[in-house]
Image: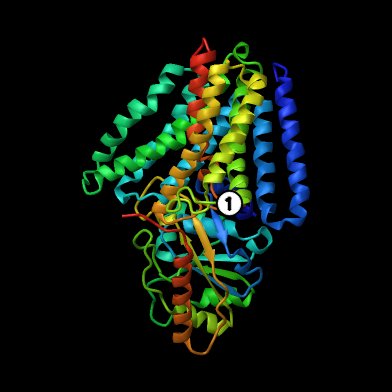
Amino acid sequence: MLRASLIVVLRPLLWLLFGLSVGGREHLPRQGPAIVAANHNSHVDILFLLCAFPLRAGRKVVPMGAADYFLATPLLRFVALRILGLLPLERRVRRGADPLEGSRRALEEGRILIVFPEGTRGQPEEMGELKSGLTKLARDASAPIIPVYLQGAGRILPKGARLPVPFLCTMLVAPPIHPQRDRAAMMADLSNAYGALREAAPPLHWS
Amino acid sequence: MTTSMPPQIIAGFATIACVLVLASVAAIRWRAIRARVLTWWVLVALLGVAVLLGKTAVVILFALISFMALREYLSLAPTRREDRAVLLLAYATVPVSYGFIAADWYGITLVAIPVYVFLLLPVALVLNGRTEGYLAATGILYWGVMVTVYNVGYAALFMNVPASEAPAGGVGLLFFLLVVTSLNDVFQFLCGKVLGGPKIMPSVSPNKTWSGFLGGWVGTALVIIALSPLYTGLPVVAVAILALLLPVAGFAGDVTMSAVKRDLGVKDASKLLPGHGGVLDRIDSLTFTAPLTFHVFAYFSSARF
């Protein structure tokens, strides 16, 4: 597969340039259905996340991305759909359509979804408000949510920047949050997990 | 390989391999040192392969070490969003400076970073127009480039020493520098562990003791005196200077980096080298001992430099 060979090439390159270290790697799911929920600051996020999975589990991974962004030009469309195997998500919902239908089906097929619950890249190295559609998806498919915190990617390639700058990147993975009936409780768990991961990340002096 | 490897280098690597075999055996029981010993194997193997391949490989290896050390430093040190482009310029000093070393342009290597990068970085930093934190940004960036690129570069510079100027050539001098610097770290650590006693700089590095510092000094001085005839061929005065100053320089490199890490709120610079911490934690002493050893050699034994 195109993506697997890309990852094999990218892994040493990303290590050399950004020294990606993964804490709590054992929490990364090997089987679906599971939802990996990461903070989002940069386009390199998706590459780091794809490279963190072992190759076999990596085949089950489906990253989700904004349809309005990734389907905008033929080149982006090719990279997103053909190479990365992205599942496009409509950020602006049309009446009557279910924007989560594709992701629901992927989870039923036993896939591992990568989602960015902030919905956008936002300000570098800052976390935006979490969207709650994620917990609905997790509950309906009874899939665990695995919170992942990426530090450094927002400095490497922030929104609007053209050239990546080498900085160390740290990925921290928290234990899974199991689906519950109470979605508000799940949201609270998720937000606490991000808080704890941020605490555990190296200090960031960036102004 | 165009020239044959000096016997001192072969014997030196063989000795290190024996020590590491012993350490690996000890690590079967002593779990705490397992990761550290394994990392040493990798580092020694990398150096061994580079030495076998020759000068270009050694220069590339040290350029990579400088790059990783600078990246670690810039990831920890306070930086401003507007300065991203200037950080790329700081990274560019690695290929440029090591390029001069590879091309054997000694005079330019010596002034490129201390004079011209010193002048260029503040100019590049002023272009984005943000004056708040300007002086701090200038100092922080320049300190990092000097320590991680310029000072470490002296280790690679030994590869330009003509074979006739040292008993085991330039590679012998490099080997001597790395062995003596690492042994100084080990001696200071072991003497401090075994002897204990009063702390030397408790607010900077709480585990360091006077006994470790002094014991390491004596131990390293003896190793320098013993190995010098085999690897450096330096006159007695120069050996005495190195024996006196190198252990102190190694200690200074160690505590200055400790102070930087403490200032930035971390214990280890990264987790790149299991059991050691980051690249900065491994090369902190070398950033001081490399220029010192090179200049002592250049002054006393080299017609070329």
* Side of B109 relative to B84 (left or right): right
- The image quarter containing residue B56 is top right
Chain where mark 1 sits: B
Tell me the quadrant of the picture where the N terminus of chain A can be found: bottom right
Picture layout, residue B53 above or below residue B3: below
Residue occupying image coordinates x 56% and y 27%: B243
Camera-nearest residue between A157 and A176: A176
Camera-nearest residue between A77 and B286: B286
Binning the other alpha carbons within 10 Å of mark 1 as few (below 14), some (14 to 19) or many (20 upward) gives some
Asked whether the viewer can see residue B45, the reply is yes
Q: Which residue is mark 1?
A: B196
The percent position of residue A105, horizontal first and vertical second, equals 58, 76
Camera-nearest residue between B175 and A49: B175
What amino acid does circle 1 point to? Gly
Residue occupying image coordinates x 44% and y 45%: B73
* Side of B43 relative to B203 (left or right): right
Picture layout, residue A104 above or below residue B299: below
- The image quarter containing residue B97 is top left
* Side of A4 relative to A149 (left or right): right
Picture layout, residue A3 above or below residue B214: below
The percent position of residue A6, horizontal first and vertical second, equals 59, 50
* Side of B270 relative to A204 (left or right): right
Tag 1, which secondary structure? loop
Camera-nearest residue between B114 and B213: B213
List the single residue furthest toward the bottom: A181
Residue occupying image coordinates x 66% and y 25%: B226
Residue occupying image coordinates x 47% and y 22%: B100
The percent position of residue A115, horizontal first and vertical second, equals 49, 69
The percent position of residue B79, horizontal first and vertical second, equals 34, 49
